[in-house]
Image (spheres, rainbow, N blue to C red):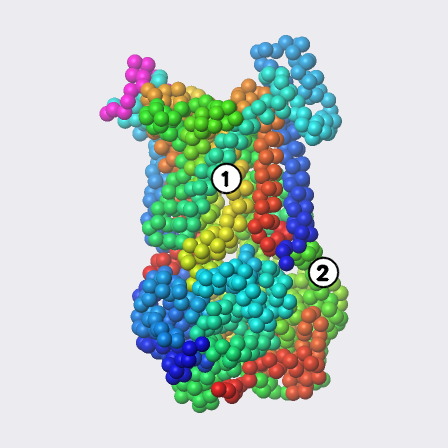
Amino acid sequence: MKQTSETGGEASQDPSGSASPASGRVAAWKLLAAHPVTLFSIFVLTCIVVVALAAPWIAPYGVNQTDVSRALQPPSAAHWMGTDDLGRDVMSRIIAATGTSMQIAVASVVFAFMVGVPIGILAGYVGGLVDAVLMRVVDVMFAFPVLLLALAIVAILTPGQLTTMIAIGVVFTPIFARVARASTLSVRVEPFVQVSRTMGTPGWWILLRHILPNITGPIVVQTSLSLAFAILSEAALSFLGLGIQPPYPSWGGMLFDAQGFMSQAWWMSVFPGAAIFIAVLAFNLLGDGLRDVLDPKQRTLAELRRKR
Amino acid sequence: MTPVPTSAPVLQVEDLSVSIGRTEIVRGVSFAVNRGSTLGIVGESGSGKSMSVLAATGLLDAPGASVTGLSQLHEDTRSLTLTSATARELRRVHGNSVGFVFQDPSTSLNPLLTLERQISETLETHRGMTRRAARSRALDLLESVGIPEAESRLDSYPHHLSGGQRQRVMIAIALACDPALLIADEPTTALDVTTQAQIIDLVKELQAERGTAVVWISHDLGVIGQVAEEVLVLKSGQIVEQGPTSSVMEQPKHTYTQQLLSARPTLGRHPDSADPDAEVVLEVKDLKVDFSVSATTGRKRIQAVDGVSFCVRRGQTLGIVGESGSGKSTIANVLTGLVKPTAGTAELQGADLLSVRGASGRSLRRRVAMVFQDPFSSLDSRMRVSDSIGEPLRVHRLPTGGSRDDRIRELLQLVDLPEEFASRFPHELSGGQRQRVSIARALALEPDVVILDESTSALDVSIQAHVLALLERLQIELGLTYVFIAHDLAIVQQMSHDVLVMRGGKSVEQGSASQIFLAPEQEYTKMLLAAIPPEKPAVVRR
Amino acid sequence: MRMSPRAVTRFLGMRLIHSAVVLFGVMVVTFALIQLVPGDPVRLALGTRYTQESYDALMAASGLDRPMGEQFFAYIGSAATGDLGVSFRSGQPVTVLLFERLPATLSLAGAGLLIGLLIAVPAGLWAALREGRLADGVVRITSQFGVSIPDFWMGMLLILVFSTGLGWLPSSGYIPISESPGGWLRQVTLPAITVGTVAGAILTRYVRAATLEVANMGYVRTAKSKGLAPSVVTLRHIARNALVPVLTVAGIQLATILSGVIVVEVVFAWPGLGRLVFDSVASRDYPMIQGAVLLIAVMFLLINFIVDVLYAVVDPRIRLA
């Protein structure tokens, strides 16, 4: 043993500085596991992914299998969620639309992430004129309501799955840029980064070793929340007839069709909407749970709660 | 005022315990405060000193806290058991019979309300005064706490005031209703030493006029020695020693009190004398730094450092001392390249330290290391201790004479940390241990000069004493050169061979430590020295 | 010593310059909209109604045959005078059509925002002051529901229950408030609840977060130490300070609320700007889309500038961003 006596003595005299953190910053997944709402949202999301992947095998009927003689049937043993005006099985269409909705959400968020995060980090880290210019561009994008800008993009291009992805992706880019910039700015002035700079550490090293690992939290949270918002946006575009085009099924499109049959067939509007709601809610709850765990400020609270 | 028998305590606390959840924070604390006298409660962070007083006065609102024991407030002919009082009864007492002053004057006033409103709302609540009557009373109060031009200050907002003035306003609020008891929770900790002395005098003066009983909570035995007749030493929620301030401080019985007293920075200690002709390692000439700041009146330039020159000799320590805003930390930031100077030169053994760039600049940067103040944020919470210490080794590809891990172990040993700490994360360490890791990281650079910017001021006194001892030992063993920046004159004297006193960006006085501390020439230096609470407790006047 | 008027003027001057810069960017984007259409926008717009004469007439009226640089300056110049071109579909001036629709949208957005604030401020304060307790959990989960519910679906559910089901309120249509305030109220109730629920859910989260931050500030402890009534502590010391940042957020969230208004207008056949954009996209009436997008963005900038003015009034510490 090497001269540990003094240090040991010091530790015992210094219960304050260490009391809460030293007793253990619990691993992120453990905190997450202790969060029933978050666990439940993960479970729901897993189910959604399974449904999306297994759609062709679990859907009881074909997507566009019409049977006019069985049109507008209320929910029954044969059609759990009823049939639409063309006699198509509502549940089968909801199941088939799950994959499309997820694909669009993931693709557009990946696009926004890949473009927005580097821009945000660059603006936050370099600062100065680069920051000023990039952030004014972001301000301009924020002046347009998300859906309006997406609508304008769809108006330029022809409506369809790819256009929807591009529209949502472009509209979400500034959100990622802003989150990445704000986190970079706050980490950049942290003393541990300053120390590293005083030691002559090159900029790229600081960026890779200190800034990137420390801004992942807020960005992961934003990704989850954006997935929720992307599903909502796709549904809204499809509802307006400018997203996924018929005959391909989409939750928003099904709701659009349902509008004409509100008084005859409530099930046409209730079930597709519920599907959107559940998927969006799951991503939002996951994002909230992740924030509790990954956001350092929130995190101390979560740890405190856990300890009680 | 109705005469109150001097023997009756204003606040009497018996066997008070506080727990949060299952953890007991305060255990069986008993004390009493008499009219017109001051009880000092002293302890390090986490000793439960604030919590016990807040619990005793019914102002504790930590979620899940439970309080047992008895606390009684005796006022004139009435008395109230605070520990069992209803929320309504407590509200009638708070601000009326018991006034509070808290630590941080920058957050304890509401930024959106005028000073008048913040004083008058207490008067309106407890005295049923009209707005106009309350305003004239607020004016009297502001004058009595020494706010200049009080009339025009009534309608200003807290951000117009300095820290010391805000604390004066807090005192005015606390004393608005002439309370029998004043709770002062670290009221001077966030203030400069000269401001601290003024606030201490103010409270004593007002107390003498009004006969208020005061409970003064502080981590600083020096301050307690100045204000309190009786003192209570708390450790981990328990009283370790209690008695008249003079006897506790002169003849402490408990070892913990003795430790606290000996760890306390006091004037008079100094390092061994050093060779006055040793080689000059760092020479700074006529350094100027201007900042452009946004203020309510528009952009203006502030001269943070204005024509400061000094030199540091090998193996010695230059102490830079000054109050907040004196520009002492700006000098540190210039020397480490965090801030660009407006003018002036800094040479490290003849090499220009200020206009360096690129790879050669990096190797020059390596030769100046810095240890920051805050032990919590100066280590990356996601990196193990070994990675933090190893970073400069990797960045500068320093020869390690063996493996990098060996070198890291060696550095840990140097700062008296066990090698197992290499694989720990910062949150698993205490404040003092983290500061040791920061020192090891600085040493990894094998620097010519180590800049210590308030490196121990965030630590409790006993930990501070250990870290200072470590720094002294390292200087002797490794021949290190320090620039030691601090606001605390006592530790600057303890560490420094030469001293630079700064105020408002300018050098007030500089010279050998013995000259500055024993025969200061400038008024400001004398004032700083006079403002330090003396080591001996003040003679208490009754 | 009230805050110096010069500081306020400076602050607002800076914000005004900022808004002008963003406005210029907005004009670039809206101008680019029509330029980016692949192929010939006039041709696309005419579709099956195409004849050479109608084509030439529309081309000349829209000025799309001129060089791009010239078009841009002409666009900025005429937009500044309130001329946004003519609608491809109806041949009427875009500005006239937009201002016909504006009152309907403003009255819906205003009513929605009002409902949103009436939900968010009390709910957010209440949850934050009972942090970690049951009430907080209920508010947090409920606001998650509100954020996650698609607004058009919410509108349809309201129609299902209150129109087709109970028959209490009409499912569509608009009566100007100037014509019949009572009639307007009947018409606006369901769409405004739809817009307001979503807006309220978003704002609740901000109010809660801001309140939590303020509730831990030193001055709240000071207020409690004065023995003030809990209602005074909450309203004068916590709520006032918490609502300053929320004000800014409410301005920025307006863009989200306007997004909601667009779809809600479609669901309830509410003849506002959203419905107009929707119809114009379907018929590829580019000048109309361009004009509507510009108008909505300008409204957003204007409201955020008003928020800045309010901010300067509420907060004596004006800092330059």
The secondary structure making up most of the magenta span is loop
Letter of the chain that mark 2 sits on in the rendering: B
Which residue is disc 1 drawn over? A110
Q: Are the residues flagged by discs 1 and 2 in contact, CB closer than 8 Å?
A: no
Q: Residues within 10 Å of mark 1 (few under 14, many from 20)?
A: some
Tell me, yes or no, whether the highlighted magenta stretch contains residue A75. yes
Up-down: is B193 above or below B161? below
Judged from the image, the secondary structure of the residue bearing numbered disc 2 is strand
Which residue is disc 2 drawn over? B301
* Relative image position of residue B508 (x, y in whole percent): 71, 76
Q: Residues within 10 Å of mark 2 (few under 14, many from 20)?
A: few
Assign the C terminus of chain A to one quadrant of the image. Answer: bottom left
Q: Is residue B155 left or right of residue B1?
A: right
Which amino acid type is marked by label 1? Val
Q: Which residues are magenta?
A: A61-77
Up-down: is A191 above or below A55? below
